[in-house]
Image: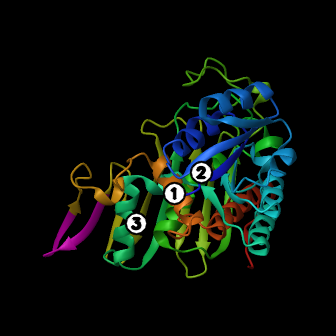
Amino acid sequence: MEKKLKIGIIGCGGIANGKHMPSLKQIPEVEMTAFCDIIPERAEKAAKDFGTPDAKVYTDYKELLKDETLDVVHVCTPNRSHSFITIDALEAGKHVMCEKPMAKTYAEGKAMVEASVRTGKLLSIGYQNRQCAQNLYAKAVCESGEIGNIYFAKAIALRRRAVPTWGVFLNEYEQGGGPLIDIGTHALDLTLWMMNNYKPKMVVGNTFRKLADQTNTANAWGDWDPKEFTVEDSAFGYIVMENGAVVTLESSWALNIADPKEATFLVCGDKGGVDTLDGVRVNYIKNNRQCLEIPDLKSGGVAFYEGTSDDPAVLDQRKWIDAVLGKGELCVKAEQALVVTQILEAIYTSAKTGKPVYIDD
């Protein structure tokens, strides 16, 4: 039996328990042997629920990184610490899966990429929505060339009243922003991936804090505390790519909208278009008629299941571990995630200055 990859988890809060650890538990080639959290009880519970019998528990991530038996580290902490923890882990000789978004700023993200290149260790970011069946189908459509040259796209992450009221989501210092950096990042990642276009030229954006001071909010997770709500509740961006293509980005945790959509997109080419606004739909012209193709993703689907699971989070971890084992390429490349962070930061900067942000590199 081949030696299993040993994984350390840094940050044992919601995203680790909701996504990373349950998904890794389903990958037979790995075992979780180290857990770290600033709240010791959380690390201890994670070790009990997901770890090996001899799993170690830490409150200082630097102590965890001294464990030379670890092959891989998952960084599941608030956004503020993504960069320096990831860099330290790479420098310690570990491959790193970092939760999205990559970092609060482009400079931090760039330093992460440079550390990965310098150390020769793999770095990926947790954009698991790429592994949804409808998104895999849409990606195949885009890659086939059947919708032609893509020149317009929309990235959509709009909630009606679903502000996360736990953890540090409302804390600008810890997170770097609100819905734009939290859920807008998923929609933008999907859209750029569909376009296979990672060369932005100019960004204009605006942010709003219009509903944050309201009470009796009918929020999905209970009323938020306006005093703790230090981030935007909505943000919108307009991105022009180097080749002239245009992307609009819409994100909100709380917007007066009757038909909310999250992690959805539409891309329009000169031969057709594809969107996930209501399942996955492909539109084109055939025999001088407007046609709409709606695939049945419940039939077949071998490519989506890979013999294990159709859970996007599990498929995401499957592809990540395969890459670490040398059995495949990274699905989410750090350089791609860096462009997402670059655009998000540009939207925030444009909102603060009231001016367009021009991207030189």
Labelled pair 2, 1 in contact (Cβ < 8 Å) = yes
Query: Number of callouts in the render?
Result: 3
Mark 2 lies on residue? 184
User: Helix, strand or loop at disc 3?
Assistant: helix
Q: Vertical placement of 43 versus 326: above or below?
A: above
**Alpha carbon distance from label 1 to label 3:** 15 Å
Q: Give the percent coordinates (x, y) of residue 110.
A: 77, 68
Please provide the residue range marked out in magenta: 281-291
Labelled pair 1, 3 in contact (Cβ < 8 Å) = no
User: Helix, strand or loop at disc 2?
Assistant: helix
Query: Of residues 217 and 294, which is closer to you in this image?
Result: 294
Q: Give the percent coordinates (x, y) of residue 56.
A: 75, 37
Q: Please, what is the dominant secondary structure of the magenta stretch?
A: strand
Q: Quadrant of residue 35?
A: top right
Q: Which mark is residue 301?
A: none
Query: Of residues 191 and 239, which is closer to you in this image?
Result: 191
Nearer-N-terminus badge (2/1): 1
Mark 1 lies on residue? 155
Residue beneath the point at 41% across and 79% down = 149
**Alpha carbon distance from label 2 to label 1:** 8 Å
Mark 3 lies on residue? 139
Residue beneath the point at 48% across and 57% down = 130
Residue type at tag 1: Ala
Question: Which residue extends farthest left?
Answer: 287
